[in-house]
């Protein structure tokens, strides 16, 4: 992860994938405002992430602002579509490979493999009986520049908004064994180094 190979191994997404379950109303509204057909909107496929970086493009965005009705809170002169565009939903996904192998940070696995004629995953440097923490530093990009930050680290030191904190983020949790885990802003998933998605499935025949 983070290697040149990882940066080239880009994962692509499109809004119309069935399991993404984007509500039909969102598709219809967004397609109308963007001036494209529903199939065109759902069919655009772009690179979204590698295992160390995610950049959600505009084709994974829908407009979900409530339909304009004269309530007194929105001036009649305001374009109803502007109201709809004012609230958006962005779709994305992230996953680890079904089987991962973890080493101490900075350990050069490739060099080790070259010096020792390969690896068989029985070497002593592999880290086990622990977790990989997935941390998301959520930012928006405007004209190729960082524009908004969910953590808002520098400004939050002066009393400004940190969205993780505002939404009730839990900085400490205790598991069923009594182990206490302390977290920092953005820590989102604990992935067991001894687990594997492949272990969750089995194949069998009927006869």
Image: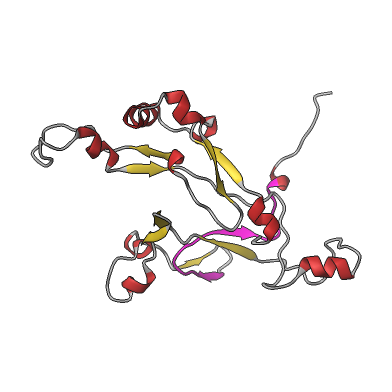
Q: Position of residue 16 (x, y in %)?
A: 50, 30
Query: Residue at 40% of width from left, 61% of height from top?
Result: 146
What segment is highlighted magenta in the picture? 179-197
Q: Relative to 190, is 201 on the left or the right? A: right
Q: Residue furthest left?
A: 72
| Quarter placement of the N terminus | bottom right
Query: Residue at 58% of width from left, 42% of height from top?
Result: 12
Q: Relative to 172, is 83 on the left or the right? A: left
Q: Position of residue 94 (x, y in %)?
A: 56, 49
Q: Relative to 82, is 39 on the left or the right? A: right
Query: Residue at 33% of width from left, 27% of height from top?
Result: 32
Q: Residue furthest bottom?
A: 158
Residue 183 on the magenta span: yes
Q: Position of residue 162 (x, y in %)?
A: 34, 65
Q: Quadrant of residue 131?
A: bottom right
Q: Residue furthest front?
A: 143
Observer-nearest of 68 and 39? 39
């Amino acid at each position: 992860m983070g290697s040149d190979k990882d940066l080239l191994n880009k994962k692509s997404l499109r809004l119309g994938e069935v399991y993404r379950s984007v509500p039909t109303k969102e598709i219809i509204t967004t397609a109308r405002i963007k001036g494209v057909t529903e199939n065109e909107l759902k069919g655009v496929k772009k690179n979204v992430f590698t295992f160390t970086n995610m950049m959600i493009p505009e084709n994974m965005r829908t407009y979900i602002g409530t339909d304009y009705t004269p309530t007194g809170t929105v001036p009649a002169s305001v374009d109803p579509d502007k109201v709809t565009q004012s609230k958006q939903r962005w779709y994305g996904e992230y996953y680890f490979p079904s089987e991962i192998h973890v080493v101490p940070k900075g350990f050069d696995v490739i060099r080790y493999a070259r010096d020792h004629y390969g690896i068989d995953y029985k070497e002593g440097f592999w880290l086990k009986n622990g977790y990989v923490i997935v941390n998301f530093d959520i930012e928006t990009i405007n004209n190729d520049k960082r524009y908004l930050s969910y953590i808002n680290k520098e400004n939050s030191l002066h009393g400004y908004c940190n969205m993780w904190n505002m939404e009730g983020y839990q900085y400490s949790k205790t598991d069923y064994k009594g182990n206490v885990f302390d977290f920092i802003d953005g820590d989102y998933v604990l992935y067991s180094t001894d687990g594997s998605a492949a272990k969750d499935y089995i194949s069998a025949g009927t006869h």
